[in-house]
Amino acid sequence: MKQHIVLVGLPGSGKTTVGKLAAELLQAAFVDIDALITRKQGKPITMIFAELGEAAFRDMERTEMAAALAGVPAVIAPGGGWAAQPGALEDARPRGFVVYLKTRADTAAARAATPGNRPTLMGEDPVARMGQLLREREPFYLKADAQVDAERHTAQQAAEDIVALARTRAGW
C-alpha cells in the first residue's frame, strides 16, 4: 500500500523546498500544512499564534494533518513543531512514512531567516533559539522511519533520497 511521505524537521530544514521537489519527482501532490492554515485563516502563522495562541494553532494543524492523511498519498510537510505534539507521529504512522530532514541548528536558522513567518523564532537570537528547538524536538524527529541529510545534500539530492525511500519502503 502506498503511504504518504511526511517530512519532519526544524523550521528551515527544507521541508517545503525538498518536499515540492520530491512530490514533483514522484508525480504526487505536495501538501504544505502551514500554507493551508495561513490560507484558510487569512493571516500568517505569527498572527494566529499572537491572536489565538499556540494551542489553537496546534488544533488547526492536527485537523489539517488528519485531512491530508485521509486523502490520496502525497508528500506532506507539517510545521516544525508538529512531530513533538502528543500522538502526532503515532496518528500519522498507519498511512504515512515519516522522514526526518536532519540539519544543524545554525544552518536551519540561516535558512529560516525570512522575517515574520516563524513564530517560534520571533524576537530572539535565531541560532540559539533554533538550538533550543532542536534539543526539544529532535527526540521526536528521531522516531521517524528514515533520515535524510538536509545539511550536506542539496535540495535536489535530498529530494532524490526521499524518492528512493518512497520507492523502496513506502510503496511508491
Image (spheres, helix red, strand yellow):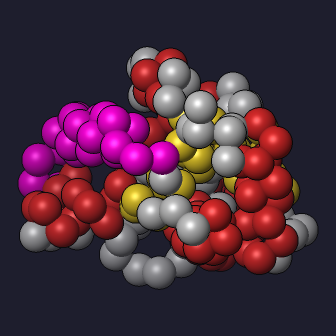
Determine whether 165 is above or below 150 in the image: above
Q: Is residue 131 left or right of residue 63?
A: right
Q: Is residue 101 visible?
A: yes
Location of residue 126 (image quadrant): bottom right
**Image quarter hosting the N terminus:** top right
Left or right, residue 168 beside residue 20? right
Q: Find out whether residue 53 is within the magenta segment.
A: yes
Q: Looking at this view, name the residue that lies furthest to the right.
A: 152
Query: Taken as a whole, is the magenta stretch helix, strand or loop?
Result: helix
Residue 122 included in the magenta stretch of the image: no
44 or 165, which is in the foreground?
165
Q: Residue at x 72, y 31 (%)?
A: 145
Q: Is residue 11 at least partly visible in the picture?
A: no
Q: Name the one closer to the observer, 154 or 50.
A: 154
Residue under the image location 34 percent in, 75 percent down: 116
Q: Is residue 41 above or below residue 76?
A: below
Residue appearing at x 31%, y 66% in the figure = 35
Whole-percent x, y for residue 172 in the image: 67, 47
Q: Is 2 drawn above or below residue 115 in the view shown?
A: above
Q: Nearer the viewer, residue 80 or 119?
A: 80
> Residue visible at 36% across and 71% down?
117
Residue 43 at x, y percent in the picture: 15, 69
Q: Position of residue 49 (x, y in %)?
A: 22, 52
Place residue 157 in its image quadrant.
bottom right
The range drawn in magenta is: 50-73
